[in-house]
Amino acid sequence: EKEWWVKPRLLECDKFVAGRLDADSSRRLFNMSPGTFEWLCSELAPLVHKSDTNFRSSIPPRKRIAIAIHRLAAGSSYVEVSKMFAVGEATVLTCTREVYAALSTAFGSVLAFPTDAAALTRVARGFHNLMALPNCCGLLTVLHLRIRRPSGPCGSSYLDHNTNFSIAAQLVVDASMRILNIAVGFPGGVHHAKILKQSGL
């Protein structure tokens, strides 16, 4: 009798679609617990829902969210994600963009630098307790995310101080390393002072 061999990741994806994903698989695919993933789906589903057409059924919100969150959590390429979830690469790109936009819409106000005195005092107290550093309301850094050299005349503006092509992301964190503010998308060659000025912080 023949035995059929199926890639384990496809079985894992099938379990996910059926809603039977265990904690280990959930952490491996999405870097979060099943409960957190389900909560995220409940928050984002109305924002990424698509209607069926006469020609085909739409991809369910849960799967659209899973595609984007897996790409975000694992850093997998569009090709890898398309194989894992049995969809086209263009679908992965579309789902990723739409879910990221939904995350920004749903949680944009959650990730915000504190503006009231009480919140700033809490942040400052955290740094004082951790390092005896008074009146510090956040640590600021700029990360460079490496990319392939962009084509066109502006490609050289992405060359950073380490001679890598990159996109710059400015982050501010509190004493618990919780992100308070993020500004991303600057060419790697932009000076950090200019990023700070343009970030609106």
Image (spheres, rainbow, N blue to C red):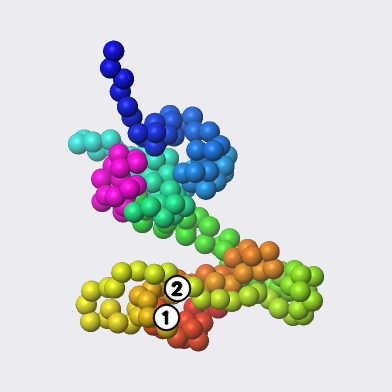
Label 2 sits on a secondary structure element that is: strand
Judge left or right: residue 59 versus residue 123.
left
Q: Three-letter amino acid code at disc 1?
A: Asn
* Viewer-side label of 1, 2: 1
- Identify which residue is drawn at 49% across, 29% down: 20
Q: Quadrant of the N terminus?
A: top left
Q: Is residue 83 magenta?
A: yes
Q: Which quarter of the picture shows residue 132?
A: bottom right
Q: Main secondary structure of the magenta part?
A: helix
Please give left or right for residue 201 compared with residue 160 in the image. right
Residue 144's mark?
2
What segment is highlighted magenta in the picture? 78-93
Q: Residue furthest left?
A: 55
What is the x, y in percent for residue 41?
Answer: 49, 43
| Quadrant (top left/top right/bottom left/bottom right) for the C terminus | bottom right
Query: Mark 2 belongs to which amino acid?
Result: His
Residue shown at 31% from the left, 52% from the top:
78
Image vertical order of residue 81 relative to residue 185, above or below = above
Query: Quick one: 54 or 91, which is closer to the camera?
Result: 91
Which of the labelled discs sits on residue 162, or is there none?
Answer: 1
